[in-house]
Image (cartoon, rainbow, N blue to C red):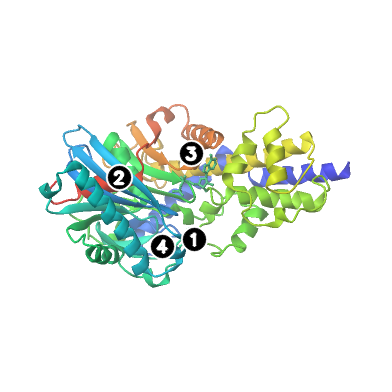
Protein backbone atom coordinates (compact mmCIF):
# COMPACT_ATOMS: atom_id res chain seq x y z
CA UNK A 1 0.00 0.00 0.00
CA UNK A 2 1.00 3.55 -0.66
CA UNK A 3 0.60 4.48 3.02
CA UNK A 4 3.03 1.83 4.08
CA UNK A 5 5.55 2.84 1.45
CA UNK A 6 5.41 6.44 2.67
CA UNK A 7 5.94 5.35 6.29
CA UNK A 8 8.98 3.31 5.36
CA UNK A 9 10.31 6.22 3.33
CA UNK A 10 10.12 8.55 6.36
CA UNK A 11 12.10 6.04 8.42
CA UNK A 12 14.69 5.57 5.67
CA UNK A 13 15.14 9.34 5.45
CA UNK A 14 15.53 9.48 9.22
CA UNK A 15 18.12 6.74 9.16
CA UNK A 16 20.14 8.52 6.50
CA UNK A 17 19.98 11.85 8.32
CA UNK A 18 21.08 10.24 11.60
CA UNK A 19 24.07 8.53 10.02
CA UNK A 20 27.06 8.18 12.33
CA UNK A 21 29.66 6.40 10.25
CA UNK A 22 33.00 6.14 11.95
CA UNK A 23 34.29 8.85 9.63
CA UNK A 24 31.50 11.17 10.66
CA UNK A 25 32.24 10.41 14.32
CA UNK A 26 35.92 11.20 13.82
CA UNK A 27 34.89 14.62 12.50
CA UNK A 28 32.89 15.13 15.69
CA UNK A 29 35.90 14.00 17.75
CA UNK A 30 38.10 16.59 16.03
CA UNK A 31 35.47 19.30 16.37
CA UNK A 32 35.11 18.58 20.09
CA UNK A 33 38.89 18.83 20.62
CA UNK A 34 39.05 22.06 18.61
CA UNK A 35 36.15 23.64 20.52
CA UNK A 36 37.71 22.62 23.84
CA UNK A 37 40.82 24.45 22.77
CA UNK A 38 38.88 27.53 21.79
CA UNK A 39 36.90 27.52 25.04
CA UNK A 40 40.12 27.33 27.06
CA UNK A 41 41.79 30.08 25.04
CA UNK A 42 39.35 32.86 25.82
CA UNK A 43 36.09 33.57 27.62
CA UNK A 44 33.30 33.08 25.07
CA UNK A 45 35.75 31.59 22.57
CA UNK A 46 33.45 28.63 21.97
CA UNK A 47 29.95 27.38 22.71
CA UNK A 48 31.80 25.13 25.16
CA UNK A 49 32.11 27.21 28.31
CA UNK A 50 35.04 25.15 29.66
CA UNK A 51 34.43 26.44 33.19
CA UNK A 52 37.28 26.49 35.67
CA UNK A 53 36.41 24.55 38.82
CA UNK A 54 39.49 25.30 40.94
CA UNK A 55 39.48 21.62 41.86
CA UNK A 56 43.20 20.87 41.79
CA UNK A 57 43.33 18.01 44.27
CA UNK A 58 41.29 14.98 43.39
CA UNK A 59 40.71 12.66 46.34
CA UNK A 60 43.02 9.65 46.42
CA UNK A 61 42.08 7.68 49.51
CA UNK A 62 44.25 9.43 52.08
CA UNK A 63 41.36 11.64 53.29
CA UNK A 64 40.26 11.24 56.87
CA UNK A 65 37.37 12.43 58.96
CA UNK A 66 33.66 13.14 58.80
CA UNK A 67 32.31 15.18 55.93
CA UNK A 68 28.89 16.20 54.75
CA UNK A 69 27.50 16.72 51.29
CA UNK A 70 24.44 18.21 49.69
CA UNK A 71 23.71 16.64 46.35
CA UNK A 72 21.34 18.90 44.48
CA UNK A 73 19.92 17.16 41.42
CA UNK A 74 16.99 17.83 39.16
CA UNK A 75 13.98 17.62 41.44
CA UNK A 76 15.64 15.77 44.28
CA UNK A 77 18.43 16.51 46.63
CA UNK A 78 20.27 14.27 48.97
CA UNK A 79 22.07 14.98 52.19
CA UNK A 80 25.00 12.74 52.89
CA UNK A 81 27.45 12.12 55.69
CA UNK A 82 30.62 10.15 55.05
CA UNK A 83 33.23 8.88 57.42
CA UNK A 84 36.58 8.51 55.67
CA UNK A 85 39.20 6.21 57.10
CA UNK A 86 42.32 7.51 55.40
CA UNK A 87 45.24 5.57 53.96
CA UNK A 88 43.09 3.90 51.35
CA UNK A 89 40.81 2.24 53.84
CA UNK A 90 38.04 3.88 51.91
CA UNK A 91 34.66 5.07 53.02
CA UNK A 92 33.94 3.64 56.44
CA UNK A 93 30.33 4.70 56.52
CA UNK A 94 28.00 6.81 54.61
CA UNK A 95 24.42 7.73 55.30
CA UNK A 96 22.12 9.25 52.77
CA UNK A 97 18.75 10.86 53.00
CA UNK A 98 16.75 11.70 49.93
CA UNK A 99 14.41 14.69 49.81
CA UNK A 100 12.41 16.25 47.03
CA UNK A 101 12.31 19.92 46.25
CA UNK A 102 8.69 21.09 46.25
CA UNK A 103 7.66 22.26 42.80
CA UNK A 104 6.80 25.80 43.95
CA UNK A 105 10.30 26.35 45.33
CA UNK A 106 11.85 25.72 41.90
CA UNK A 107 10.38 29.01 40.75
CA UNK A 108 10.34 31.01 44.02
CA UNK A 109 13.08 33.12 45.58
CA UNK A 110 16.61 32.01 46.36
CA UNK A 111 16.03 32.67 50.06
CA UNK A 112 13.03 30.34 50.22
CA UNK A 113 14.81 27.67 48.21
CA UNK A 114 17.97 27.70 50.30
CA UNK A 115 16.11 28.04 53.61
CA UNK A 116 14.28 24.85 52.74
CA UNK A 117 17.48 23.03 51.82
CA UNK A 118 19.32 24.30 54.91
CA UNK A 119 16.47 23.20 57.15
CA UNK A 120 16.59 19.66 55.74
CA UNK A 121 20.35 19.64 56.17
CA UNK A 122 20.07 20.78 59.78
CA UNK A 123 17.54 18.04 60.59
CA UNK A 124 19.81 15.44 59.02
CA UNK A 125 22.92 16.63 60.86
CA UNK A 126 21.08 16.63 64.20
CA UNK A 127 19.72 13.13 63.67
CA UNK A 128 23.06 11.74 62.53
CA UNK A 129 25.04 13.26 65.35
CA UNK A 130 22.54 12.07 67.91
CA UNK A 131 22.88 8.55 66.55
CA UNK A 132 26.65 8.46 66.54
CA UNK A 133 27.25 10.57 69.65
CA UNK A 134 30.54 11.89 68.35
CA UNK A 135 29.56 15.40 67.29
CA UNK A 136 31.67 17.57 69.52
CA UNK A 137 34.83 16.05 68.10
CA UNK A 138 34.32 18.28 65.12
CA UNK A 139 34.30 21.95 65.88
CA UNK A 140 33.91 22.84 62.25
CA UNK A 141 31.97 20.77 59.80
CA UNK A 142 32.96 20.73 56.15
CA UNK A 143 30.30 20.51 53.45
CA UNK A 144 30.62 19.64 49.78
CA UNK A 145 27.81 20.72 47.48
CA UNK A 146 26.98 19.49 44.00
CA UNK A 147 25.19 22.05 41.93
CA UNK A 148 24.34 20.87 38.41
CA UNK A 149 24.05 24.29 36.78
CA UNK A 150 26.73 26.45 35.16
CA UNK A 151 28.56 28.44 37.78
CA UNK A 152 31.38 30.94 37.37
CA UNK A 153 33.99 30.22 40.01
CA UNK A 154 37.02 32.01 41.36
CA UNK A 155 37.74 29.44 44.01
CA UNK A 156 36.66 25.89 44.77
CA UNK A 157 34.24 26.84 47.53
CA UNK A 158 32.01 29.36 45.81
CA UNK A 159 30.68 30.56 42.50
CA UNK A 160 28.13 32.73 40.78
CA UNK A 161 25.14 31.16 39.02
CA UNK A 162 25.24 31.89 35.29
CA UNK A 163 21.89 30.39 34.26
CA UNK A 164 19.28 27.88 35.33
CA UNK A 165 18.40 24.73 33.38
CA UNK A 166 16.18 21.68 34.01
CA UNK A 167 13.00 23.56 34.89
CA UNK A 168 14.44 25.78 37.63
CA UNK A 169 13.91 29.51 37.37
CA UNK A 170 14.64 31.31 40.60
CA UNK A 171 15.26 34.63 38.91
CA UNK A 172 16.87 36.53 41.78
CA UNK A 173 19.57 33.86 42.06
CA UNK A 174 21.21 34.52 38.70
CA UNK A 175 24.42 36.46 39.19
CA UNK A 176 24.49 35.63 42.91
CA UNK A 177 27.00 33.56 44.84
CA UNK A 178 25.49 30.14 45.45
CA UNK A 179 27.59 29.27 48.49
CA UNK A 180 26.99 32.61 50.12
CA UNK A 181 23.22 32.26 49.75
CA UNK A 182 23.34 28.74 51.14
CA UNK A 183 25.66 29.80 53.96
CA UNK A 184 23.26 32.58 54.99
CA UNK A 185 20.40 30.12 55.19
CA UNK A 186 22.59 27.71 57.16
CA UNK A 187 23.36 30.42 59.71
CA UNK A 188 19.64 31.14 60.05
CA UNK A 189 18.98 27.46 60.70
CA UNK A 190 21.67 27.29 63.36
CA UNK A 191 24.25 25.54 61.20
CA UNK A 192 26.81 28.30 61.38
CA UNK A 193 29.56 25.86 62.29
CA UNK A 194 29.26 24.21 58.89
CA UNK A 195 31.28 25.62 56.03
CA UNK A 196 30.87 25.12 52.29
CA UNK A 197 34.31 23.72 51.46
CA UNK A 198 33.57 22.77 47.86
CA UNK A 199 30.89 23.83 45.39
CA UNK A 200 31.12 21.55 42.39
CA UNK A 201 29.27 20.55 39.28
CA UNK A 202 27.78 17.06 39.49
CA UNK A 203 30.20 15.77 36.83
CA UNK A 204 33.08 16.94 39.02
CA UNK A 205 31.62 14.95 41.92
CA UNK A 206 31.51 11.91 39.66
CA UNK A 207 35.13 12.44 38.64
CA UNK A 208 36.10 12.70 42.32
CA UNK A 209 34.45 9.37 43.14
CA UNK A 210 36.02 7.76 40.11
CA UNK A 211 39.46 9.06 41.06
CA UNK A 212 39.06 8.04 44.70
CA UNK A 213 38.46 4.46 43.55
CA UNK A 214 40.88 4.44 40.64
CA UNK A 215 43.60 7.04 40.19
CA UNK A 216 43.77 6.55 36.42
CA UNK A 217 40.39 8.29 36.14
CA UNK A 218 40.84 11.51 34.16
CA UNK A 219 37.34 12.42 32.98
CA UNK A 220 33.70 11.99 33.91
CA UNK A 221 30.53 11.98 31.86
CA UNK A 222 26.90 12.15 32.97
CA UNK A 223 24.07 11.07 30.68
CA UNK A 224 20.79 11.46 32.54
CA UNK A 225 18.11 14.12 32.23
CA UNK A 226 20.83 16.27 30.71
CA UNK A 227 24.39 15.53 29.69
CA UNK A 228 27.73 17.02 30.66
CA UNK A 229 31.38 16.13 31.07
CA UNK A 230 34.48 17.29 32.91
CA UNK A 231 38.13 16.26 32.81
CA UNK A 232 41.52 16.96 34.29
CA UNK A 233 43.44 19.56 32.27
CA UNK A 234 47.01 20.81 32.59
CA UNK A 235 47.09 24.27 34.15
CA UNK A 236 49.27 25.68 31.38
CA UNK A 237 46.73 24.59 28.76
CA UNK A 238 44.10 26.82 30.36
CA UNK A 239 45.18 29.93 28.56
CA UNK A 240 42.24 32.09 29.62
CA UNK A 241 43.23 31.85 33.29
CA UNK A 242 46.23 34.05 32.46
CA UNK A 243 48.63 32.58 34.93
CA UNK A 244 46.15 32.64 37.79
CA UNK A 245 46.76 28.95 38.34
CA UNK A 246 50.54 29.01 38.40
CA UNK A 247 50.71 27.10 41.65
CA UNK A 248 48.86 24.02 40.58
CA UNK A 249 49.77 21.40 38.04
CA UNK A 250 46.30 20.68 36.80
CA UNK A 251 42.69 21.58 37.22
CA UNK A 252 39.36 19.98 36.54
CA UNK A 253 37.46 21.77 33.78
CA UNK A 254 33.66 21.58 33.60
CA UNK A 255 33.01 21.52 29.87
CA UNK A 256 29.24 22.15 29.88
CA UNK A 257 29.34 19.98 26.77
CA UNK A 258 25.57 19.91 26.36
CA UNK A 259 26.06 23.21 24.59
CA UNK A 260 28.53 21.77 22.06
CA UNK A 261 27.74 22.61 18.46
CA UNK A 262 29.35 21.51 15.22
CA UNK A 263 28.25 21.41 11.61
CA UNK A 264 29.31 17.75 11.66
CA UNK A 265 26.50 16.82 14.06
CA UNK A 266 23.93 14.74 12.14
CA UNK A 267 20.90 16.93 12.84
CA UNK A 268 17.48 16.22 11.40
CA UNK A 269 14.33 18.28 10.85
CA UNK A 270 13.00 16.75 14.08
CA UNK A 271 15.96 18.08 16.08
CA UNK A 272 15.61 21.49 14.49
CA UNK A 273 11.88 21.64 15.31
CA UNK A 274 12.40 20.39 18.87
CA UNK A 275 15.05 23.05 19.39
CA UNK A 276 12.99 25.84 17.83
CA UNK A 277 9.97 25.01 20.01
CA UNK A 278 12.05 24.75 23.20
CA UNK A 279 12.31 27.60 25.74
CA UNK A 280 15.98 28.00 24.78
CA UNK A 281 16.45 27.76 21.00
CA UNK A 282 20.03 27.27 19.78
CA UNK A 283 21.11 26.32 23.28
CA UNK A 284 22.25 22.84 24.35
CA UNK A 285 22.09 21.47 20.80
CA UNK A 286 24.29 18.46 21.64
CA UNK A 287 22.25 17.69 24.76
CA UNK A 288 19.02 17.86 22.79
CA UNK A 289 20.25 15.00 20.56
CA UNK A 290 21.46 12.86 23.46
CA UNK A 291 19.89 13.12 26.87
CA UNK A 292 16.93 11.56 28.64
CA UNK A 293 14.91 14.73 28.60
CA UNK A 294 14.71 14.68 24.80
CA UNK A 295 15.15 11.25 23.17
CA UNK A 296 11.54 10.17 23.68
CA UNK A 297 10.28 13.40 22.21
CA UNK A 298 12.37 13.03 19.06
CA UNK A 299 10.75 9.62 18.57
CA UNK A 300 7.31 11.12 19.14
CA UNK A 301 7.97 13.70 16.44
CA UNK A 302 8.90 11.06 13.90
CA UNK A 303 5.81 8.99 14.73
CA UNK A 304 3.66 12.10 14.47
CA UNK A 305 4.98 12.83 10.98
CA UNK A 306 4.34 9.27 9.84
CA UNK A 307 0.84 9.47 11.23
CA UNK A 308 0.23 12.72 9.34
CA UNK A 309 1.64 11.48 6.06
CA UNK A 310 0.33 7.93 6.04
CA UNK A 311 -2.66 6.18 7.48
CA UNK A 312 -0.77 3.38 9.16
CA UNK A 313 -1.58 4.61 12.68
CA UNK A 314 -5.29 5.12 11.98
CA UNK A 315 -6.93 8.47 12.56
CA UNK A 316 -4.77 11.17 14.09
CA UNK A 317 -4.38 10.98 17.86
CA UNK A 318 -4.25 14.27 19.72
CA UNK A 319 -1.99 12.78 22.35
CA UNK A 320 0.66 12.23 19.73
CA UNK A 321 0.81 16.03 19.30
CA UNK A 322 1.51 16.61 22.99
CA UNK A 323 5.18 17.52 23.54
CA UNK A 324 7.13 15.28 25.92
CA UNK A 325 4.24 12.83 26.38
CA UNK A 326 6.56 9.96 25.44
CA UNK A 327 9.29 9.80 28.07
CA UNK A 328 12.66 8.21 27.37
CA UNK A 329 12.07 5.25 29.74
CA UNK A 330 8.97 4.32 27.68
CA UNK A 331 10.96 4.69 24.50
CA UNK A 332 13.59 2.36 25.97
CA UNK A 333 10.91 -0.17 26.88
CA UNK A 334 9.61 -0.21 23.30
CA UNK A 335 13.12 -0.36 21.89
CA UNK A 336 14.04 -3.35 24.06
CA UNK A 337 10.71 -5.17 23.85
CA UNK A 338 11.64 -8.82 23.43
CA UNK A 339 8.17 -10.30 23.27
CA UNK A 340 7.64 -12.02 19.91
CA UNK A 341 4.57 -9.95 19.04
CA UNK A 342 5.96 -6.70 20.49
CA UNK A 343 3.26 -6.55 23.10
CA UNK A 344 4.91 -3.75 25.08
CA UNK A 345 5.17 -1.56 22.01
CA UNK A 346 1.47 -2.09 21.36
CA UNK A 347 0.60 -1.28 24.97
CA UNK A 348 2.61 1.95 25.06
CA UNK A 349 1.28 3.10 21.68
CA UNK A 350 -2.22 2.47 22.95
CA UNK A 351 -1.97 3.74 26.51
CA UNK A 352 0.40 6.66 26.07
CA UNK A 353 -0.01 7.85 22.51
CA UNK A 354 -3.62 6.82 21.96
CA UNK A 355 -2.84 4.74 18.87
CA UNK A 356 -4.74 1.44 18.89
CA UNK A 357 -4.58 -1.70 16.77
CA UNK A 358 -1.14 -1.26 15.25
CA UNK A 359 0.00 -4.09 12.97
CA UNK A 360 3.10 -6.07 13.90
CA UNK A 361 4.87 -4.65 10.87
CA UNK A 362 4.18 -1.11 12.07
CA UNK A 363 5.29 -1.97 15.60
CA UNK A 364 8.59 -3.13 14.14
CA UNK A 365 8.89 0.21 12.42
CA UNK A 366 8.48 1.93 15.82
CA UNK A 367 11.26 -0.20 17.30
CA UNK A 368 13.39 0.76 14.31
CA UNK A 369 12.81 4.48 14.98
CA UNK A 370 13.78 4.11 18.65
CA UNK A 371 16.89 2.26 17.56
CA UNK A 372 17.96 4.95 15.10
CA UNK A 373 17.59 7.74 17.68
CA UNK A 374 19.36 5.90 20.51
CA UNK A 375 22.11 4.59 18.24
CA UNK A 376 22.89 8.14 17.12
CA UNK A 377 22.78 9.52 20.69
CA UNK A 378 25.09 6.86 22.12
CA UNK A 379 27.58 7.20 19.29
CA UNK A 380 27.70 10.99 19.64
CA UNK A 381 28.53 10.61 23.33
CA UNK A 382 31.28 8.17 22.33
CA UNK A 383 32.69 10.75 19.92
CA UNK A 384 32.57 13.37 22.67
CA UNK A 385 34.50 11.10 25.03
CA UNK A 386 37.16 10.38 22.44
CA UNK A 387 37.30 14.13 21.77
CA UNK A 388 38.30 14.68 25.39
CA UNK A 389 40.89 11.90 25.18
CA UNK A 390 42.27 13.46 22.05
CA UNK A 391 42.55 16.84 23.74
CA UNK A 392 44.64 15.36 26.55
CA UNK A 393 46.68 13.11 24.30
CA UNK A 394 45.14 9.84 25.44
CA UNK A 395 43.45 8.69 22.24
CA UNK A 396 46.47 7.02 20.71
CA UNK A 397 46.86 9.55 17.92
CA UNK A 398 49.96 11.19 19.39
CA UNK A 399 51.08 14.48 18.04
CA UNK A 400 48.54 15.05 15.26
CA UNK A 401 46.35 18.12 14.89
CA UNK A 402 45.08 19.36 18.24
CA UNK A 403 46.86 16.50 19.95
CA UNK A 404 49.92 16.37 22.09
CA UNK A 405 51.80 19.48 21.07
CA UNK A 406 49.02 21.95 21.74
CA UNK A 407 46.53 19.97 23.73
CA UNK A 408 48.68 18.63 26.45
CA UNK A 409 48.20 15.63 28.64
CA UNK A 410 46.33 14.87 31.81
CA UNK A 411 47.95 14.44 35.17
CA UNK A 412 50.10 11.43 34.46
CA UNK A 413 49.97 11.37 30.69
CA UNK A 414 52.79 9.91 28.76
CA UNK A 415 51.91 11.78 25.60
CA UNK A 416 50.64 9.51 22.89
CA UNK A 417 51.89 6.48 24.77
CA UNK A 418 49.72 3.68 25.94
CA UNK A 419 48.74 4.45 29.50
CA UNK A 420 45.62 3.14 31.12
CA UNK A 421 42.87 5.76 30.98
CA UNK A 422 39.62 5.59 32.90
CA UNK A 423 36.48 7.62 32.24
CA UNK A 424 33.86 7.64 35.01
CA UNK A 425 30.27 7.45 33.78
CA UNK A 426 26.99 8.05 35.54
CA UNK A 427 23.36 8.60 34.63
CA UNK A 428 20.35 6.46 33.86
CA UNK A 429 20.86 6.34 30.12
CA UNK A 430 24.14 4.53 30.58
CA UNK A 431 23.29 2.52 33.66
CA UNK A 432 19.67 1.55 32.90
CA UNK A 433 19.34 1.57 29.11
CA UNK A 434 21.23 -1.51 27.99
CA UNK A 435 21.25 -0.86 24.26
CA UNK A 436 22.36 2.73 24.79
CA UNK A 437 25.29 1.49 26.86
CA UNK A 438 26.24 -1.19 24.34
CA UNK A 439 26.13 1.22 21.41
CA UNK A 440 28.26 3.69 23.33
CA UNK A 441 30.88 1.13 24.36
CA UNK A 442 31.07 -0.29 20.84
CA UNK A 443 31.47 3.15 19.28
CA UNK A 444 34.31 4.15 21.62
CA UNK A 445 36.13 0.94 20.67
CA UNK A 446 35.39 1.49 16.99
CA UNK A 447 36.71 5.07 16.95
CA UNK A 448 39.83 4.26 18.97
CA UNK A 449 40.63 1.12 17.01
CA UNK A 450 41.58 -2.37 18.15
CA UNK A 451 45.06 -1.52 19.21
CA UNK A 452 44.30 1.39 21.48
CA UNK A 453 40.81 0.73 22.81
CA UNK A 454 41.93 -1.81 25.47
CA UNK A 455 43.67 1.07 27.27
CA UNK A 456 40.49 3.10 27.65
CA UNK A 457 38.05 1.95 30.31
CA UNK A 458 34.57 3.34 30.86
CA UNK A 459 33.65 2.74 34.48
CA UNK A 460 30.30 3.28 36.15
CA UNK A 461 30.68 5.07 39.47
CA UNK A 462 28.23 3.44 41.82
CA UNK A 463 28.41 5.94 44.62
CA UNK A 464 27.06 9.03 42.94
CA UNK A 465 28.33 12.54 42.61
CA UNK A 466 27.15 13.55 46.10
CA UNK A 467 29.73 11.31 47.74
CA UNK A 468 32.21 12.93 45.36
CA UNK A 469 31.32 16.36 46.75
CA UNK A 470 32.01 15.09 50.26
CA UNK A 471 35.34 13.66 49.07
CA UNK A 472 36.23 17.02 47.52
CA UNK A 473 35.27 18.83 50.71
CA UNK A 474 37.80 16.50 52.33
CA UNK A 475 40.60 16.90 49.79
CA UNK A 476 40.18 20.69 49.83
CA UNK A 477 39.71 21.05 53.56
CA UNK A 478 42.49 22.75 55.50
CA UNK A 479 42.70 19.89 58.02
CA UNK A 480 43.19 17.15 55.46
P1 LIG B 1 19.32 13.00 36.68
O1 LIG B 1 17.99 13.67 36.65
O2 LIG B 1 20.09 13.31 37.91
O3 LIG B 1 20.08 13.21 35.44
P2 LIG B 1 19.19 10.15 35.99
O4 LIG B 1 20.60 9.88 35.70
O5 LIG B 1 18.43 9.05 36.68
O6 LIG B 1 18.97 11.44 36.86
O7 LIG B 1 18.48 10.43 34.61
C1 LIG B 1 17.12 10.62 34.48
C2 LIG B 1 16.76 10.58 33.01
O8 LIG B 1 16.99 9.28 32.48
C3 LIG B 1 15.32 10.91 32.74
O9 LIG B 1 15.28 11.78 31.61
C4 LIG B 1 14.69 9.60 32.38
O10 LIG B 1 13.73 9.82 31.38
C5 LIG B 1 15.83 8.78 31.86
N1 LIG B 1 15.72 7.37 32.23
C6 LIG B 1 15.54 6.85 33.47
N2 LIG B 1 15.50 5.51 33.44
C7 LIG B 1 15.64 5.15 32.15
C8 LIG B 1 15.67 3.89 31.46
N3 LIG B 1 15.52 2.73 32.10
N4 LIG B 1 15.86 3.92 30.14
C9 LIG B 1 16.00 5.07 29.48
N5 LIG B 1 15.96 6.28 30.07
C10 LIG B 1 15.79 6.32 31.39
Which of labels 1 and 2 is toward the front?
1
Spot occupied by residue 351 in the image (x, y as percentages of width and height): 69, 45
In primary-sequence order, the first of circles 3 and 4 is 4
Mark 2, residue position: 468
- Residue 433's disc number: none
Spot occupied by residue 51 in the image (x, y as percentages of width and height): 35, 57
State the SS at label 3.
helix
In primary-sequence order, the first of circles 4 and 2 is 4
Q: Are marks 3 and 2 in contact (CB under 8 Å)?
A: no
- The residue positioned 42% from the left and 57% from the top of the image is 101
Mark 4, residue position: 45
State the SS at label 4.
loop
Mark 2 neighbour class, 10 Å CA radius: few under 14, some 14 to 19, many 20 or more:
many
In primary-sequence order, the first of circles 3 and 2 is 3
- Label 4 and label 2: CA atoms lie apart by 30 Å
In primary-sequence order, the first of circles 1 and 4 is 4
- Label 3 and label 2: CA atoms lie apart by 19 Å
Mark 3, residue position: 430
Q: Nearer the viewer, residue 183 or 127?
A: 127
Amino acid sequence: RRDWRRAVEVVRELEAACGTSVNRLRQVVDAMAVEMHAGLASEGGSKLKMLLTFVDKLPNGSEKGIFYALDIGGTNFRVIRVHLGGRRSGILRHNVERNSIPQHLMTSTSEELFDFIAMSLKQFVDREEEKTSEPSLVSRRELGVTFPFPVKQRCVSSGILMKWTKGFSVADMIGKDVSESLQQSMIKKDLGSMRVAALVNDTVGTLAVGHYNDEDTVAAVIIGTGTNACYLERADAIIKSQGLLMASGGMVVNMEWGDFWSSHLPRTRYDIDLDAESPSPNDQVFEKMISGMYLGDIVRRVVLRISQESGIFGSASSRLSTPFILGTPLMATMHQDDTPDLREVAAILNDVLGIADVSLKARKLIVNICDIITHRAARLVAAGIVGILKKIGRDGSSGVAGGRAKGGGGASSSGGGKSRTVVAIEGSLYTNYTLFREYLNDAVAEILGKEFSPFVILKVTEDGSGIGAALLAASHSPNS
